[in-house]
Amino acid sequence: MPSDLSSLVHWILFLPLGAAAISALFLRREGGLAAWLSTGTAFAIAGLSLLLLGKGVDVTWHIELAKFGGVSLGFGYLIDANARLMLFVVSFVAAWIHLFSVGYMKEDSARGRFFAGLSIFMFSILGIVVADNLLMTFIFWELVGFSSYMLIAHYFDKDYAAAASKKAFIVNRVGDLGFILGIAMCLSLYGTLDFVALKDHAAAAKTLPIAIGALLMCGFLGKSAQFPLHVWLTDAMAGPTPVSALIHAATMVAAGVYFMARVSFLLAPEVLQFIAISGAGMAALAGLCALAQTDIKKSLAYSTLAHLGIMGCAIGLGRPDLALMHMAMHAFFKATLFLGAGSVIHGCHHEQDMLKMGGLLKKMPLTAVTFIAATLSNCAVPFLAGWYSKDAIIEAAYHGGHFAIFAFLALAALATCLYSGRMIRLVFLGEANSEEASHAHESPWTMTLPLVVLGLVYSVAGGFLASTLLPAGSLQPIKPALDAIVFHLAAPSTIVGLISLVVGFFGALKFYGSVRGADALQVVSPRTYHLLEHRWMDGVYRWVVDSVQRRLAEFVAFLDLLIINGVAVRWIGGGVPAVLGYLTGRSFHRGQMRAYALWIVVGTLFLAWFLIAR
Amino acid sequence: MDTFPATLLALAITAPIFVGLILLAGRDLPRSFSSGFAFGGFAIPAVLGPWLLVLWSDPNTAPQQFQSEGFWGFGFALNGLSAPLLAMTSLVGLAAGIKALTQEVEGRNTYLGLILFMLGGTLGVFGTNHLVGVYFFHEFALIPTFILTLFWGGEGRRPAAMQMAITLTAGAMASLAGILIAIDASGVEYGAATFESVALGLQNAKHIPAATGALVLFGLGTLASLFPFHSWAPPGYSSAPTPVSMIHAGALKKFGLYGIILLGLSSLDITGGTLGTWFLWFALANVVLVGLICLTQRDLKQLLSWSSVAHMGPIFLGIWVCGVSGKADGLDAAAFLMVAHGLSCAALFLLANAVRARAGTYRLDELGGLAARTPILAALFIAATMASIGLPGFGNFWGEVGVFLALRDQSLWLQALVASTVVISAVYSLRAVASTFFGPASEALEKRFAAAPFGDLGGAERFAACVLLGASMTIGFVPSLITKSVNPVAADITTTSQHNAKAPTQAAPAAPAQR
């Protein structure tokens, strides 16, 4: 009975908005209360989402918000199997991250604002998931961008946080520019923005216009930090670590993937091809770049970029089901990795430089074990969560005959193992490399419990989860993917995976153990390190902003000042009062404004009299 | 005997004018009395304006029930376009009034009285249906604007007031000529010249002089800061006292657009032929060129003034595309944006002044890190900024997106240029937010704080900002509050405009849809 379940969706969507409003209005100084309100809400939503998942029933509901001319702008829900899965993943991961934040943000003076921001984010992301039309997606898309902006700017008194928040918002808006044009084009061609109706139109059409897919893809490039709009994600690590875990790893960036899956029927083959190639290239490149980061969070951010590339690649290969599956698996283990990093940072008294860590396995055992488990899942060790989805995508590339893509993905797999091994070696093994690391301590239960739940239960038991635990109805999007994997050792993906693991992971463990207190790659080959560390695209954008945009703006401003304001207006503006002044014997342009004001009054009264008397 | 809604309308317009008159006459009235009295003058319309909008949208009330005699021969009435604008004006007026009441100025009673005049005139613009009456009320509001800027303004007020006075008078004169010619051509008596009657008359007119449309478009366009007739606006808003900038940029300026829609678009085929092409290019310049100019601004209030000009671009384009496409959605969106922009723009001027009151400057390079000292001011300023760059949840979103969608059948480059405002406005607005509120506190600010510690935003201004932002969020969440009122009149105007565009006396066909 869809009508009954729509009220369940109302609750899921609007509970966090209510929590955010209460926190923002009344709990600004009651940080503790705000924290528990927001966390409680998140768990409630997770419960409701699980309920919805269990019911396995589609829900549709729609109202009209307004009419502009003949265009009806509506608000509604389209809950299908994909949406139920996404709702569950987002809300479940979010709930545990909320709990983690309670501990992590305990000392923060602006907890009220922080948790209000998290709740606003929840509202926004859930809106994207349930939306039944393009405009509503766009609305929540923008709101997600805003909440991300606010949360990155949490430490707003730091220049880097101020700059990073601005950058994230603006880069996302560049993507949204394309997105809104794509929406307009859909409306122009098909006369509707409704997903269901659009699907019918697309199915009826002989060919799909490339432009629609390309424009809608722009939104995905921005939100999911795909090349060339990927530049904001690493800077976004300026936000508190739970924000990085929730928004910039597990959910928001995955929203782009979800959206692409939702409108996959609108994507022309050329667009898909572009996404596949750029995604695979991105996966390989970002994975290698992760090797040249010493900040633990930034290294993880590059890892996220790589995984988003893999998901994008799956979309491009025409397998949105695999993309969503990898999105779900990735959400669990990447959230764990980020929370683990947060726990490490917390334990090391806010030290984020991996070169200054080391030997934390003994000092923070719980954190270390969960982190390592999630790392292995990240490396796609067989039968861990990441293996099922990542190998399925590599397999799809191979069987589809896309060998270039397959090669890129293989390189990405190797890079993943390399940076994972490096991370484990630098952070948890060896000796402590700084005062902070030698005095590290394990985090409180509010932080370790989420790690254990997310890390052990889900990362490790991911495959079990995928094949057995989830209720039957929710499996639809994943089922074909699971069937598609060839689970035998001779499969190319398994071979690639095992070679990567041995060469990459264990090689990195050994290689990075060879130098202490410095990055081995930087010591051995400074040039390679610099090549990977340098942010080339940032340079391009800086050039565009400084040399093109700024000069153009200044040129236009100069023209405006010179021609319009200077010549035209001054000439007329100076001329009229001069003539009047000459006529009246008074010099208006010397500033006799009182007289001028008087003249206006007299003139107007005269005019009024003239008109009325007529 | 006037009906109840008509009485409310008359009261909303006359109350501020009446209170203003008393304050002007009683310059020496005691402060406590004048404050309370003036507040009444600001508050009465603020209650009645939204109420009137609700009554107007109620299908059980007929438009005739809002009509009354008015004064000076200009009858009071509402239409679907003016009802939301009147409500917006009344709220902007309340916020501006509260701001004015918190200011310490010389000749306070005169100051308040003139602002009340300005408000009453602006309300009158939207509260009368008589064409010359609309014009009269506009002048009635404009004259106090000049005087207020001249005597109570900030830096550079003399040249700014002078330039504003000259340009606006020139624009108003041009538009008056256009209006008078149009009335003449329609064959309607001046006394009976309402928007409806003139539009009807022009439909059957044998000949409309060629320049009429241009006079109306560029004359009224000047008042609404259409490029390249915008030069008065940035210095004018910047140097005016804050309540004046709020009412002028937020509400009074919309008169130009209102007139362009009800007279130009509906009856004078301003979107057709060569004139239409010029209109398009000028409106695009508002979006793109003025947007670029905004990027070069280094002063917070200058930036807000320029951006207020830039934000007119999408409104003009909504009007343009309505005429070109013959579909009403562009007009619906433009009208929505007119209301929403009034609210967000007034809120920004209000809060920027609160920044200056604390930091002592509008210069962005001297500001910085204010959020740590004034979190509420920062939160409200960010909210107002987000409203102005079209974040969903605020009214501006519907207007902007509505215009983008209305342009859907035009060429992609045109759509891309218009939609580029999404990026450009985000760049300059967020830059302003970051340099004002984020980062470590600037040295200048620290020194100033050490010398004279300042607090967060005061209760009165907090309330004023919340009224504006609350209203913007209300229409952001329930857009039908505006569209219900605007839809019918927008549909009518669109139909009329298509009829007139095809009239034999108009040589020019509708502008080619670039596809």
Image (cartoon, coloured by chain):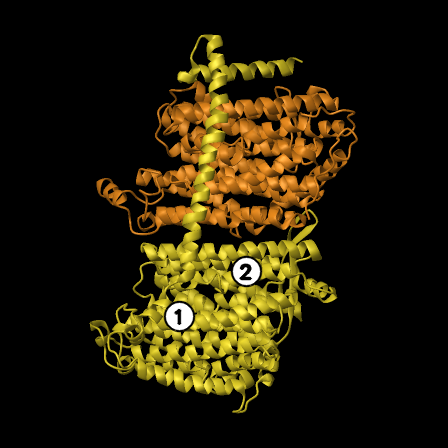
Chain colours: A yellow, B orange
Do tag 1 and tag 2 residues touch (Cβ < 8 Å)? Answer: no
Q: Point out which mark residue A167 bears.
A: none
Location of mark 1 (residue): A289
Location of mark 2 (residue): A219
Amino acid on which disc 2 is placed: Gly
Query: What residue lies at 50% left-to-right and 75% top-to-bottom?
Result: A408
Placement of the N terminus of chain A among the 4 image quadrants: bottom right
Taking the image as drawn, is residue B458 in sight? yes
Taking the image as drawn, is residue B70 in sight? no
The chain letter for the residue carrying disc 1 is A
Please rate how many residues cluster around mark 2, counting C-alpha atoms within 10 Å: few if below 14, some from 14 to 19, many from 20.
many
Q: Quadrant of residue B59?
A: top right
Q: Eyeballing the image, is B330 above or below B172? A: below
Q: Quadrant of residue B328?
A: top right
Is tag 1's residue or tag 2's residue first in the polypeptide sequence?
2
x then y, percent, for residue B409: 68, 49
> In this view of the protein, which residue sits in the foreground, A2 or B333?
B333
| Total marks in image | 2
x then y, percent, for residue A441: 26, 76
Query: What residue lies at 57% left-to-right and 81% top-to-bottom?
Result: A398
Q: Are marks 1 and 2 on the same chain?
A: yes
